[in-house]
Image (cartoon, rainbow, N blue to C red):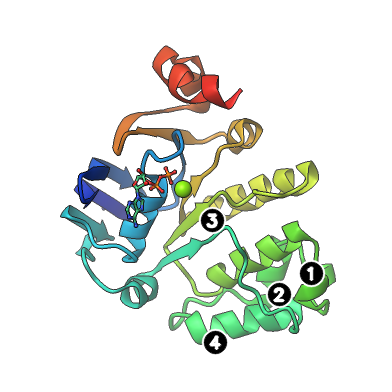
Amino acid sequence: MATLELEDVHRHFGGVKAVDGVDLVLERGELRALIGPNGCGKSTLFNLITGALRPTAGRIRLAGRDITGLPPHRIARAGIGRKFQVASVFDDLSVEDNLAIAAWTRGRRGQHLPLAALLTRLRLAERRATLAGELSHGERQWVEIGMMLAAGPSVLLLDEPTAGMTAAETAATVDLIRDIAATGDVTVLVIEHDVGFLERLDCAVTVMAKGRILRTGSFADMRADPEVRALYFGTAA
Ligand code: ADP
Ligand code: MG
């Protein structure tokens, strides 16, 4: 059974068909990138999956359970975590305390990753006692990803997780995201524009255009595809 399944999902804003009939199936532990030009509906799709927006039509299922139209807190509790572009960590608390609070407030019973293991996965073991406010931009983003992991999600939605990061932080984030998916428990869908990031992430890429899915394939195939190039890589270069 697929972890996340979207079936003919639509979301219209007045006359704007922001999401216009999306079918998407993500398997357990799958890592998938979502790309497409500005305004093609990527963030709206995330908002539909998390319940921030209700679909105009279509069904969304999590591990076979219909979650269409549920309020965001229930979808979050069902196991879908989302990272926004702006981190929402507590600056006055240590890295460790931020993670502990997330596990306590958001954690689902029996799903907790031990804190020490989580710190190691985030490459923040040495920074465990550091106040979040003293971290670099990249480290803060990793704490936020860790706060989502502490909740024991089955799906992680990441919207441009490397925005504003240094090259080294971006490379470390690729490793972190690959590690998370490689556990086999968490399905990761990541919106990203950075071509170097996508190449390193080395996973299937789904290309959206005008509210629809144009194609899914390897990064190499997408980069070689004339239509995708014209639509996306051409304008990104
Ligand atoms: P992307 O994330 O791919 O850049 P969005 O999902 O943000 O694209 O936007 C898709 C389309 O839907 C755009 O035309 C955008 O202007 C429109 N849109 C998104 N959110 C709203 C909203 N809350 N109200 C009206 N139009 C919206
Ligand atoms: Mg967007």
Q: Residue at x 43, y 83 (%)?
A: 109
Looking at the rendered structure, the secondary structure element under dot 3 is: loop
In the drawing, what numbered circle is on residue 183? 3
Circles 2 and 1: CB distance less than 8 Å? yes
Label 3 CA crowd tier, 10 Å (few <14, some 14–19, many 20+)? few
Looking at the rendered structure, the secondary structure element under dot 1 is: helix
> Is residue 2 visible in this depiction of the protein?
no
Q: Residue at x 25, y 44 (%)?
A: 16
For this view, does 128 lie left or right of residue 46? right
Q: Which residue is mark 2?
A: 116
Q: Which residue is mark 1?
A: 125
- Of the residues shown, which amino acid type is indicated by label 3? Thr
Label 1 CA crowd tier, 10 Å (few <14, some 14–19, many 20+)? some
Q: Nearer the viewer, mark 2 or mark 4?
A: 4
- Of the residues shown, which amino acid type is indicated by label 2? Ala
Ranked by sequence position, the earlier of labels 1 and 3 is 1
Circles 2 and 4: CB distance less than 8 Å? no
Q: Residue at x 66, y 69 (%)?
A: 118
**Up-down: is 223 above or below 74?**
above
Mark 3 C-beta closer than 8 Å to ligand 2: no
Q: Give the Cα separation between the discs numbered 1 and 3.
A: 19 Å
Mark 1 C-beta closer than 8 Å to ligand 2: no
